[in-house]
Structures are given as structure tokens and as C-alpha cells.
Amino acid sequence: MILDPSRYVAPGVSGPQGFKPIRKNIYLPVPAQVREILEENALVRTFVLEFDDPLVNQEFTYEPGQFMMVSMPHCGEAPISFSSSPGRAGSFALTVRRAGRLTSAMHRLRPGDTIGVRGPYGRPFPMADLSGRSLLFVAGGIGLAPLRSVLEFCLDNRDDYGEITLLYGCRTPADICFADDLEQWRQQGVHCLCTVDEADDTWSGRVGLVTELLPEAGAEAASWRALVCGPGIMIHFVLSRLVEMGFPRDHLFTTLERHMKCGVGICGHCFFDEKLICREGPVFSMSELGDTRNL
Amino acid sequence: MLDSFVLDKDHLLPLLRKLGKDYRLIAPVRNRHGDTLFTEIHDLDKVEIDLEHQPQSSLKPFFFPQVEVLSLYGLDRDAVSGATWYSFYPQLPENRPTVYFGVRSCDMMAVMYTDMIFLQSSEYDVYYARHRENAIFITIGCNRPFANCFCNATRSGPFLEHGFDIQLTDIGDRFFVETGRARGVRLRKQWSYFFRDAAEEDKRAQFQAALEARGLFSRLVHVDLVTRILARQKEPTEILAELSARCQDCGGCAYICPTCTCFTIHDQALDEDRGERLRTWDACTFSGFTRMAGGHNPVDPERQRIRKRFLHKLLHDVEHHGRTSCMGCGRCVDICFGGVDILRFIEMVSENETEPEETP
């Protein structure tokens, strides 16, 4: 998928090689307008965006698990996963936790402001291979954002997938994202279980690590597929636990986070052993990862 | 079959003068501080082209500058609503036809490697391409390898079999000339009166020089062996930790390396509403290279900061591209005051290994 055809550049060489094909400038962001901002919790907001150019908006497609490079004025760029389902055309959503300079600037955005984006990049979740399967989603904190894209895609194509279970763990009740979605998903038949590491007065639900919910998920190791996202250490323990429960490693999928600059496999920042996460990932099956202790 | 010719040494300057009229000319020039650096030559009579010393810099900065403006950006504000409009204006570099003269084999091989990184078919880096597309390379074989050179072990010298436009070999009072790629053939034809056909004795002299050069390396470096050890055995974590502890975070090795292509992209504000988006060299040895917003760093700088550098060059690139991305130029040996160079690593890994090295 190529963004905005008007922004192609011609090398403009006359000379021995003669005519050369026109190439796209991979580093050039295109403007996207903030349509809506949803406050997920004190630190996390979801930005619903659409391209200013209606043609681009119409043609833009992406897949669950992919990401965009987001530009903010004077802040450079950062990779942000889609949190929306590609089936819902006309806009896309990025969910962002306030953590550094760029994300803080994003949290100061108001509807109507524009940001720069380029993409989509990265290898998505293998949705075609997952079709016909029952799915277990295991998310930690903001890690639900990329899985939300998959989950909503499955709900948009409900007949293609079997049972859906979501296990969601957060540090405290105040860290829970997508609370409204959780309620809606329950109504749509998703089996949702939530837990927090530390409860407070508002919390009457489960307390403990998300791994403790795994036995209750009702997921059958032989036939289900599992999708896991969260902090590196949580991914490691959940994947290990699922392997112990008998899941084959190539039935377990996760998506990794790294510092990135180019998004297209050149700048070198996002390495994981010999892999570049932006190009070979960010989605990996566990069988591709080897040692998961330092995700 | 490469065509071969002879260029008398007293024809060299006249040829370069001619080329200088049509092309930007870049060659190793010895400056008044005694440094030999690839430099743009404006007046051939005022500079000293130095083919005796190894250029301290490679060609990398010409194709991938240390700092480069990718685009300008601006922010417009709606006077009524206050909404901001954010736009980018790409800044493409010039692509003047350029002759790079006096390029060593290792540096030519490095350009071929960086071509692969920046011009890979799926994602094409237009900035690199602009710098690179009108370049002509006149290389020179190394009759006498320099002190830290080990291009014989990385199979990137001291002479080239492909990749150059024109390759010169010093054979006394004349250069033996081979034309390689089309631009070199064309250039030789265009200025054919500077050259004459090579005679048997010229070919013999070139063969002799190339053969002798292979015997003149002062270091025996087991590059292939180390690649095999790294692929076969457990990672040498203790060696990596020991070298990491001595790394001073200066990035000199990556900056001087002709094949290190990591970069960062960042913004420099010009005023409140305008700025430049820059691309700047980066180094995987820097402690912040992999640190994410929020502070998590998947690489432990104390023990692992040089891990990616050495494994990438000696193992990962062999797996991905079929050869090491170390070209054996030896520049990182001189630049590192902590002694954390790739030769040290290769020596430490291969030290206690008894497997016999295959001789090419």
C-alpha cells in the first residue's frame, strides 16, 4: 500500500542510464487529522485519525499487528501499533501511553490537529492462518492495544473464528484500558477475564498475575491459537506457561516493541538477535523467537 | 574477460584534469596536518593526491553524510480554532556526476554493501540513491597492505575482481588499467588517447604485483573461523562482556567504519513552528541506541553494548547476505583507545580454537 501519489519524487537524472522509474520517498510523512480522542485512563489515549486527502483515506489499508511511524512537531518519530480493526474503513486508531517526549506531545493534541504518519509497516498477525480457530488473547496493560485490532477484526468477521477468550492483566485498576470495549466485547460473546496486580477500593475483581488466569481460559492446547502482548517479562512468562500447557510453539504469537527510527529495515535500531523487528516482525510466532527472556 | 590497458604515470594528472571538467573529482588528499582524507578537489595543482597512505576516511560520508536534512517541516495554526496543520517539505540532495579516484578495494566493497542496505528492492532510500547514482569509481589495488589491514581474510582485497568502473595497479612508471562496469568502459573509450593497450609484460607485472601483495599482510586474522565458531557454539558472552566494559561509548568505530549504516532520525527546531528533520549517524554501541520511551532497554550496556556490532558484522550478515560486512580495512583498530576493535574480538574468540583454518 502506497501513500499519497502526489508525493513521489523523481531522481531527475539525465545521463547514461536514461529514464529511471519514479520512486517514493520512504521517509516522508503524510498529514492525518485527529478526528476523535478517547481517554482510556490517566496515561493512555486513543486517537482516531483520518488522512486529510480523501483519496488516500479511501485507499489506505492495513492489517492487525502492523504499525505506523508517527511524527510530532520537533519530536521526531515513534512507531505506534494500530488499535483499530482495518474492517472499519475511513479512519484508523492509534492508542498511546504517555511515556516520553513524543507521546506527551500527542497527549496535548486536540481534535482537528494534524500529525504526520507513514506506513503501514511490519508483518501483521497471520489472520488467514488463524481463521477457523478458537483464539486466546492474553494482554498486559497497554499491550491490549495491538490485540484490540485483532480482536475487533475477528468480531467484524465473526463467522471465520471460533471461541474467543481474552485474559487481561493490569498493574492497578487505574491502568485498565478500553474499559468500554471490554464491556461491549462481553456482550458480543467474548469470554473476558481481568485481573490486577494490586487492587484498590474500586476493585472487586481478581487480584494476581495474568498467568494465574490461564487455567480458567478454557483454551485447548491442541486446537486453539494464542496471541500475547504486554511487557517483555509478561510475554516471556505467558508464553512459557502456554508451552507447559501443551501449546505448540508455532501456535503462539506475540508482537514485540523496540526503539525504531526508519520502520523499514534500514536504521538498525530495532534488532532482536539477527532479526530486525520492524521488517521481520513486529509479530512473531514463538518458534521464531528462540530465547524469550530478554524481550 | 576484463579489458586491460596501460596509463603512464605522467598521463595521470592530465587525465584527472580532463575528468575534472566534466565531473566533481574526489580523491585521497594529504592535508597540511598530515591526514589523508577523501576530499573534493577544485584545483589539481594546489593539492597533493596521496596514493601512498591509507585514507583515514572511507567514502561513506559522500553517500551517507554524517548529518543530512531529510525534510523541512512547518506548523500552521488556524487563527480561529487554534487547530494545527503540520506539513513536510522533502529536501533531496544534489546528484552531481562524480569521479571517486584512488578508492581502495575494501572501500569499494563497502560501497557495494551499503548499496544493498539502502537500495534493497522493497524499500528504496532516495537520499542515498541521489548521492550514489552518478558516481564513477576509479579504484587502486594495494600492492602493499597497510599495518592493520586484513582484507585478504574478509575477501575484499587487496585487488578487486568486480565492482569497480576502472581498477588501477601500480606497476612502476605506469598503471595497469582494467575496465569493469559500463561507466568505466565508456570513460576509458572517451579519453582513449591517454591509454594504450596492455602488453604481455604489463600483464605479467600486474600479476606479479597482485601475487606479491597477498604475501605482505602483517596480520593473520581468522575471520572465517570466527564466523564458524559463532554460528556453531554458544555465544562468547564473557568475551563480549569484557570488551563491553572497556568500550567508552564514543561511537568512533561505527563512524569510521565504511559499512556501519545505523542512523537516527530527529528534529531540529528552527523556530517555534518550523524545523528540520535530520538523519544522523548512530552507533549500536551507544547506551541509548535501543532504549525505549519509559526507560526500558533490552540491551544491557554494561555487558552487551558491543555484542550487536561484532555479531552483526561477523555472523548475522553472513546469514543474511552471504558474507561478512567487515571489509578488513582496519580503521577501527586505530580509532579505538579502549582496544575494543574487531581484530581484538576475532583474536579472543579464535585464540583457543584448534580447528585448522582453510586457506583460500
Image (cartoon, coloured by chain):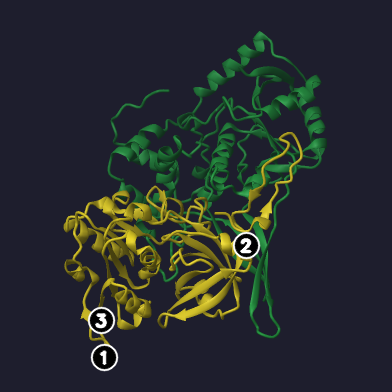
Chain colours: A yellow, B green
Q: Quadrant of residue A189?
A: bottom left
Question: Circle 1 marks a residue in which chain?
Answer: A
| Residue A238 appears in the picture as rendered | yes
Given the image, on which type of amino acid does mark 3 rest?
A: Glu
- Residue at the farthest top position: B200
The secondary structure type at the circle numbered 2 is: helix
Spatial CA distance of label 3 from label 1 is 10 Å
Q: Quadrant of residue A132?
A: bottom left
Q: Kindly identify which residue carries mark 3.
A: A198
- Who's the residue at 60% across and 42% down the image? B58
Of the residues under marks 1 and 2, which one precedes in the sequence? 2
Spatial CA distance of label 2 from label 3 is 48 Å
Q: Kindly identify which residue carries mark 1.
A: A201
Q: Nearer the viewer, mark 3 or mark 1?
A: 1
Given the image, on which type of amino acid does mark 1 rest?
A: Asp
Given the image, on which type of amino acid does mark 2 rest?
A: Leu
Spatial CA distance of label 1 from label 2 is 50 Å
- The x, y position of residue B354, in whole percent, is 28, 30
Question: Would you say the residues marked 3 and 1 are in contact, meaning their CB atoms lie under 8 Å apart?
Answer: no
